[in-house]
Amino acid sequence: MDNVKIALFGFGTIGTGVVKILLNQAERIRKTTGKNVVLAKVCDKDLTTQRDVLVPDGVITSDAESIFNDPEIKVAVELIGGLEPARTFILKLLENGKDVVTANKALLAAHGEELFTAARKHGRTIAFEAAVCGGIPILNSLSTALQANNLLSITAIANGTCNYVLTQMEGGNMSYSDAVKQAQKLGYAEANPAMDVDGTDTAQKLAILAQIGFRTTVDWRNIPRIGIESVDAIDFNYAKELGYRIKLLAVARQSDEGLELHVSPTLVPKDNPLAAVRGAFNAVRIIGDSVGPVFFHGLGAGQLPTASAVAGDIIDTVLGRTAITFNALNLWNKTDAVNRIKQPETFFGRSYLRFNVIDKPGVLHEISGIFGKHNISIASLIQHEIEDSAALILTTHEAKEGDLLQSIQELETLRSVQGKVVRLRVQNI
Ligand code: HSE
């Protein structure tokens, strides 16, 4: 039986998980691939921290060059995270004839074109299932089993940290900051959790999902995004009263006018399967023109779920399956950008608005006049008496984003409206 030597860069949480799977599942991997997949090197600059897995003698090294220059290593796994040195390492690995597996969505988001162009130039592959929704095989499903569909939408809960925090806040179990700290402790959060909570991580994942699902290259920085810091504990109560839960949703929706992409805290009807996604779980709901709605649910963060996707990519690369998909998809290739991305002011959707008003005659009339003028229809309206004023909570029917933002601006100038208008999206697909 042939040996295939592989090397791993980054012996952190996920790296440790990958080592565990490769060692514990060696027999299964041998049977599947027909080869001895040998973990030849694990490279990390930290050689002293004790990891909870035993690695054979001589495997751990801090010498990256020795791996670049070893012609026997055929597959390299990048789990360092961040932009550098991950980018330079991957470029060197590709130049030196190695196929690459990575979980690094931030790197793909920033340098996908450069890395994929290099891989094509050197006749190598890059596999990255673990970069989006951890253990959920979503990229694989989009690029193979669902590829015959014209997609109408992809709606995802793609950040485990945010879903964990929202779930804890909703249950009244923890404050926002305690929940973020706990997500860090449990290994869900990014090294810098600001990238989780401000929607960056989700937008980077959405850019990858949109590229594979809708064959369009989009810069994640152009995806409008709102993080979960903007969600107030009181909104969970009002959402509940209206029959919704609040989730950080990534949405890609195709219409005749183009592709709508956004990341925002969103009210999800409580009978929608996305509303039932709790804790660090992720989920993706896809609607295809032939298949109809499909729902994926699983752990999107954490050591073994993410390592499961990485190990699956290693096996596919050894089997030659990655090369087929890699060539067929031709990702991060500008010539493939066929979809028109919609401008935010043309988005079309439902909204939840909350604001405080002075409780006196004529106020509702004034407010409904603004919505009427902008052709926005109110779907529900609740008024709660609070000290000296009233909290108004309303949902709208589908409306154009530009009209809604204009209405909010006008509402905020009314003397009867106190403070800012809180706006969340309401899921409508
Ligand atoms: N930090 C991410 C999350 C996991 O919380 O979902 C890696 O993508």
Image: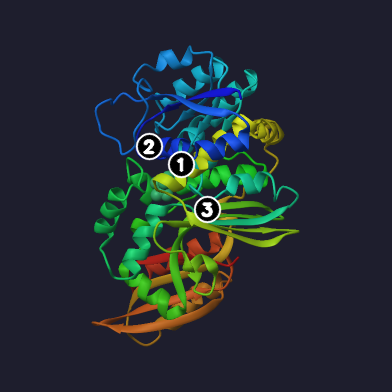
Within-10-Å neighbours for mark 2: few <14, some 14–19, many 20+: many
Q: In what element is the residue under mark 2?
A: helix
Residue at 46 percent across and 70 percent down: it is: 352
Where residue 268 appears, as percent x and y from the top left, is: 50, 68
Instruction: Specify the amino acid type for callout 1.
Output: Ala
Relative to residue 424, is residue 98 depicted above or below?
A: above
In the foreground, 343 or 198: 198
Does any portion of residue 201 appear in the rendered image? Answer: no
Mark 3 or 1: the one toward you: 1
Q: In the drawing, does residue 41 fall left or right of residue 337?
A: left
Residue at 65 percent across and 20 percent down: it is: 123
Where residue 356 appears, as percent x and y from the top left, is: 33, 75
**Quadrant of the snapshot with the C terminus:** bottom right
Real-space Cα separation, disc 1 to disc 2, in angstroms: 8 Å
First-in-chain label (2 vs 3): 2
Where residue 124 appears, as percent x and y from the top left, is: 62, 23
Where residue 69 appears, as percent x and y from the top left, is: 48, 11
Q: Which mark is residue 16?
A: 2
First-in-chain label (1 vs 2): 2
Q: Which mark is residue 262?
A: 3
Q: In what element is the residue under mark 3?
A: strand
Instruction: Specify the amino acid type for callout 3.
Output: His
CB contact under 8 Å: marks 1 and 2:
yes
**Quadrant of the snapshot with the N terminus:** top right
Q: Which residue is mark 1?
A: 307
CB contact under 8 Å: marks 2 and 3:
no
Q: Which image quadrant for residue 360?
A: bottom left
